[in-house]
Amino acid sequence: MTNIYDKAHDFANVLKDLPEVVAYREASKKISESPELKKIVEDFRRIQIEAYNEQFQTGTVSDATKEKMQKVGSVAMINPSVAVYLQSEAQFAVIWEDLLKIFNDAIGVDIITPNS
């Protein structure tokens, strides 16, 4: 019989060494070591969440929030370390979402969106 925990550890070891994961980990470390960079990312996240909440609650994002997103996004993207972090995070997010879909399919229960 297959030991699922051994397979999970094998999977974790493969995941740990993926170029996208290595890049994300390295970019994250740079951000965490700099209070200035960390604040830029936190500000970016705060506006993202605000926009998401507006979209969820009202079906649209206000012009004021769009303007804030543009300003904060511009600051984030002109900083090379923050830009690399956000890009590597997005690449990792695609992999993670794909993996969750694979797990969902294996389980046979839609644990991401149970009502769909």
Image (tube, helix red, strand yellow):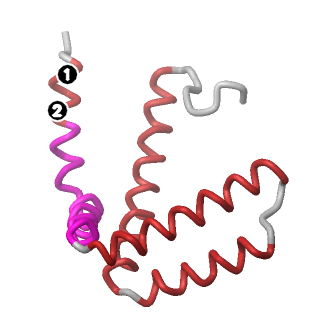
The span shown in magenta is 11-33
- Please rate how many residues cluster around mark 2, counting C-alpha atoms within 10 Å: few if below 14, some from 14 to 19, many from 20: few
Residue 21 falls within the magenta-colored stretch: yes
Where is residue 10, by image quadrant? Answer: top left
Asked whether the residues under the numbered discs 1 and 2 touch, taking CB atoms below 8 Å apart as contact, a structural biologist would say: yes
- Quarter of the N terminus within the rendering: top left
Identify the residue position indicated by label 2 in the image.
9
Residue type highlighted by circle 1: Tyr
Instruction: Describe the element under mark 2 as helix, strand or loop.
Output: helix
Instruction: Describe the element under mark 1 as helix, strand or loop.
Output: helix
Residue 96 falls within the magenta-colored stretch: no
Q: Nearer the viewer, residue 91 or 76?
A: 76
Identify the residue position indicated by label 1 in the image.
5
Q: Which residue appears at 63% of the width and 81% of the height?
A: 70
Where is residue 92, by image quadrant? Answer: bottom left
- Residue 40, label in figure: none
Residue type highlighted by circle 2: His
Q: Which residue appears at 50% of the width and 38% of the height?
A: 101
- Please rate how many residues cluster around mark 1, counting C-alpha atoms within 10 Å: few if below 14, some from 14 to 19, many from 20: few
